[in-house]
Amino acid sequence: MRKTIKDKKFRYYVLSLALIDLVTCMTLIPAEMLKHQQYFNVAGSVWCKIKCFSNVFAAAAASYCLVLVAIDRYMLTCRPVVFCKVQSISHGLAWRLCLSMLVLAVLTSLPSSILCGITSDVLRLNKGQTIFVNLCEIEPHFEYGISRYVYRISLFILQLTIFVIMIVLYARIGLEVWTAERIRAAQTVELTALNHHLHSHERLPYPGAFA
């Protein structure tokens, strides 16, 4: 069983997703906690850019990896002939797809590190006091530009497309499994009826047995 699992390219996608989740838990979650702890006094612009890059990279890489998993399950379930044809090159194809997925996630995340930066502001309290704050939000010269909105809209369209693709693929997989289960159930009923019919004829006496 272990060798059978090891020989399948599906393990590349699972290991990639597990690695992304592990890196996210070890780096991004502590960084998010630190950001909320020092929300109004962010120390450096470099740390802010790394934080913004990591946010988008974690979401993009996980989304792309889940799409690879959905496509692989779809090919296995709904296109088994094609799946068997590419099985001989599955190992090389799988790690190339995983590498391409990571490169695409990096390209998707780079604009976020460029747009993010330290925004200085002044908070005026009720008692006339003022507090100078540094927020990790958007670079001042990008604040009123169209580039930030283009990037956000592009990310929204990309995530929506991934969402639709996964729904369609898994809906097709579910339909294929449901159809196969109905065919199997019908065949089981037919075999049961056939066995019952054969056993009934075996129990009948031969003609002339009581002659």
Image: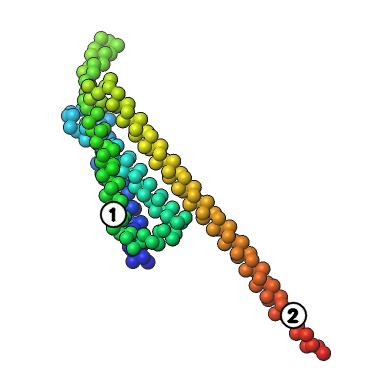
> Residue 29 lies in what quarter of the image?
top left
Instruction: Give the CA separation, mark 2 to mark 1.
Output: 64 Å
The residue carrying pointer 1 sits among few (fewer than 14), some (14 to 19) or many (20 or more) residues within 10 Å by Cα, namely some
Question: Residue 103: image x %, image y %?
Answer: 26, 44
Q: Is residue 125 visible?
A: yes
Image quarter of the N terminus: bottom left
The residue beneath circle 2 is: 204
Residue 95 marker: 1
Vertical comparison of 53 with 87: above or below: above
Q: Residue at x 36, y 49 (%)?
A: 68
Question: Residue 109: image x %, image y %?
Answer: 27, 37
Of all residues, the one furthest to the top in this rendering is: 128
Marks 2 and 1 in Cβ contact (< 8 Å): no
Residue type pointed to by label 1: Trp
For this rendering, which residue is in front, 68 or 28?
68
Vertical comparison of 177 with 61: above or below: below
Q: Residue at x 75, y 85 (%)?
A: 206
The residue carrying pointer 2 sits among few (fewer than 14), some (14 to 19) or many (20 or more) residues within 10 Å by Cα, namely few
Q: Secondary structure at mark 2?
A: loop
For this rendering, which residue is in front, 70 or 117?
70
